[in-house]
Structures are given as structure tokens and as C-alpha cells.
Image (tube, grey):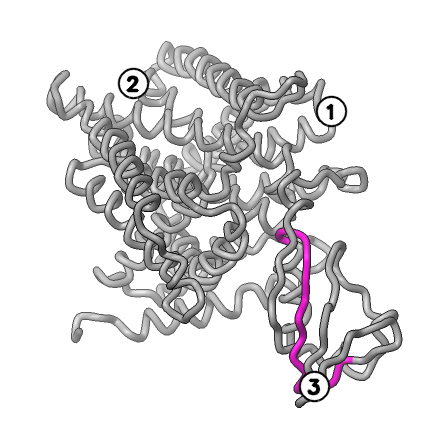
Amino acid sequence: MENINYDSVLILALFAFITPLFISAFKKYKIPFVVGELFIGIIIGKSFLNLIHVDPWIDFLSNLGLAYLMFLSGLEIDVHSIKVGKSKKATGYNYVLLCVIMCLISIGISFVICKILYSFGLIKSVWFMTFLLSASAPGFLVPFLKEKGILKTQYGQILLIYSLLAEFTSLIAMTVISSKISYGLSYKSFLFLVIILSSFLIYIILKRFQNKYDFSVFLGNDMHIEVRAAFALMLILVTISHKVGTEIALGSFLAGVIFTFLTDKSREEDLKYKLDIIGYGFLIPIFFIMVGVKLDISSILTSPKYLLSIPIILIIIYVIKLIPSLLLKYKYGLNKTISASFILSSQLSVMIVGDQIAFNLKLINTELYSTLILTTVISCLLFPLIFNKILKTDNFKELNKFDVKKIYIREVVPLNKDIFNKPLMDVKFPFGCRILLILRDTEKIIPNGNSTILEGDVLVIAGFGEESSKFISMLQSS
């Protein structure tokens, strides 16, 4: 354990805690927390203060954060609603098909642009750069849309599914292309199929195992058997991905999808709440901060040529996302179409991984590598801010159909002093949330509008879907 740099771990933990508080102070600008974590990483990283000294343990925590983020991305796909309905609305298989078409269009646009760049001698590989520039960032999109409260809407699901398709199409394509450049066309080019086949076999085995054994006996105690199962499944596929030389993001994402299929819908929201605490409370902030920490922008600042290329690359990335996003205009109108094009232009993990692969293959030089990495970070800073600025949310009231049909009941100890000794009628609770019972010492109170909450009370609350999580946060904010 002597190899662990506890000072750096402590600094990461402190800034992971401080960043949301710091960002919350800028209420006027509504800066996403993920953007704040990236920015803080740049400040404390090698570009400026150089407070973090990366060691294998910090790298492990960062990679685990990425894997866990992709696992949660898989969980966020509403697989239960992907079915063909009688209507022609973009739901179920229909909006999956829409996302596939959007993804193919973005690849086509990227290919045309890369052909032009190649003809001017600006890039060395048309196909590799095609998939690199058409990549997306569900790892960034999930926490961002979750924070905005639109991830579970149909609009949010389309953005998520498109982003996942774009990411893994790019990831698999770049893996095959790089393997072909390094080894020629061989079995190593198709090792990613091992992950897909393994995922399918694991799902079949777990489904039969689940039907044969009754795990409900574990649900009433503190063993949290479902959380243990989630980590075990994720690490199995992450380990297989690592062994065959494929990016761990692919394995962890497929683990999330499998777990969604296996999870009992009546407990799905409660389980996601538990898993979110581990991810967004610890592992995921470390990953985003470390992305900023590892960025060294000094080589770019001394080279005007590459510095000037940053806005050009940003425009190219945006155009690649804008054209396919126009398919959303008929369904959601111009405002949400343009908003979608901006948030989908945000890049992150696959762009960074692709840049590293291209650099190792000598397809790009050191300066261009640093430029692309910095452009990736800037896209995460710039495009979400534009999205926040232009998206009109006043008529954005749609809820996922499963959210309004499920009520979650929890027991909570309130810590928010602002609601103590105040009639409930004067407290503004989240939509669809209620206090069912107040437990005060040995007394059980069924509340009405004149009832008050006292310090030390225990509340039994109910709420629709994710609104119940917001209710808990409100009650426990101190």
C-alpha cells in the first residue's frame, strides 16, 4: 500500500466535494457539474498547478470511474419500452431506427469532410478520422441530461441512444482499423466480437439462474445483493475486455444493458438510486477531474498554427452532428433540434481514446494530438453552455411513461432546517411527491396542510420515479 499517493487521492476527493458547491454559486450561468469537474482538473493538473501526481492507483480509480459511467449509461436505456406499438410515433423500435439513420448520416458527412481534408494533405487516414470525428460521448451526456431532468424523456432517450450508437460504432471501427494498420487483417481485428458473444452467453446463464433461485430473501436486509451483482457483472465484462485488448467501455456498457434486462421493474428505480450514489458520489467525478488533470496545453499555446485549428475542428464536429439532428425537427421543432446538435457535439472518452490510438500509429503528431485533446475538453465546456442557453424548457413537460406509473416509498430523516416548524402547505415539494406519515418519537402522524416537520422526525414519503430522488435531496440538504 506504500505506492498509493494519498496526497493526490485526498486532493481529488476534496475537489470532487468542493466543485459542485463552487459551480452552484454561479446560478446565473447554469454551468453543468461535469463541465466544472473538467475545468477544475485542468487547473489542478499538469497545465497549471500540477497538484496531482498520477500513480497506478489513481489511474485505476479513473478507469473504474469511466467503466462505471458506461455501466450506468447502459442502465439508463429504457429497454422495457423498446417495442413496436400501433402508433407511428418515434418510440420503441421506431426511435431506435431513427437513431441508426442519424448515426449513418453523421458517418457519411464525416467521411466527405475527411476526404476533403485528405486531399489537402491535412490527415493521413480518411477512415480512421471519419470515425474519430463522428464519435459521441454518452459518458458525458448521461450525467448532463440527468442533471437537467430530461434523460428519461423520449427526447433524452433518443439523444442517449444515438450517442451510444455513435460511440460504439466509432470505437469498434477504430479498433478494427488500428489492428489492420498494425497487424494486417487478422483475427485480432475482430476480438471485440468476443465481448459481444460473452455478453450474450452471460445474459442467458444469468436469466436461467435468476429463474431457478429465489433471491428475494436477501432484499430485506443490509446485504444489498443487487449492488454486489451489478459490480460483479460489470467487472466480469471489463476483465474480458481487458484480456482481449478491447476498450473496457464496451464491456461495461454491455454489462449495464444486461443488468437492465435482468432487473425487476418494480425495484429498478430504487436500485438505480443506490448505484448512482456510488458512481456520481465518488468514482465518476474522479474520472472527469482526471481527464482535465492529464491535459497539457503548453505545447499548443506555443504553436499558433494548432491553436487556430481548434475553432475549425469544433465547427467540423458540429456540422457532423447538425445535419443528422435535422431529422428531429418534425418531432420536436427547431429549438430542440438545434439544441440536440450542440449537446451531441460534446466529445469525451472515445475521442480521447481515438486520439491516443492515432498518435501511437503515427497518424497524428504530438502537437495535433494535444490540439485534439484540448478541442475535446473545450467541446465539453462550450457546447453544453450553448445548449443551456438556447434550449426552451417551458413546454418540455413530457415524462417517461414508466415514471408516472411507479410510486416509490422511502423512509427519510429530514435535515433541511428551512422546512422545520413550517406548515406543509407553505413548503414547495417536487411534483408528484407527498409525505405519507410523520414518525415522532412513539407518535404516528398522518399529515395535513397545517402539519409541521420537527427536527428528529422520521418521514415516510412517496414520489413518482426520479422525482422521489429530488424529494430526498431537498429534505436532506443541510
Between disc 2 and disc 1, the foreground one is 1
Residue 257's spot in the image, x, y percent? 40, 39
Whether residue 378 is visible here, answered yes or no, is no
Residue 37 against residue 237 in the figure, above or below: below
Quadrant of residue 55 within the rendered picture: bottom left
Q: Label 1 neighbourhood size at 10 Å, few (<14), some (14-19), many (20+)?
A: some
> Disc 1 or disc 3, which is closer to the eye?
3
Marks 1 and 3, how far apart in space? Answer: 52 Å
The three-letter amino acid code for the residue at tag 2 is Ser
- Determine the residue positioned at 62% across, 41% down: 402
Q: Which of marks 2 and 3 is in front?
A: 3
Q: What amino acid type should be assigned to the residue bearing mark 3?
A: Arg
**Residue assigned mark 3:** 440
Front-lying residue, 270 or 17 = 270
Q: What residue type is labelled 1?
A: Leu
Separation of residues labelled 2 and 1 (CA atoms): 35 Å
| Left or right placement of residue 357 versus residue 347 in this view | left
Report if residue 77 lies within the magenta region. Answer: no
Place of residue 221 in the rendered image (x, y in percent of width and height, measured from the top left): 41, 70
Q: In screen coordinates, is 198 left or right of 224?
A: left
Q: In which quarter of the image is the C terminus?
A: bottom right
Mark 3 residue element: strand
Q: Is residue 269 left or right of residue 116?
A: right
Q: Which numbered dot is residue 334? A: 1
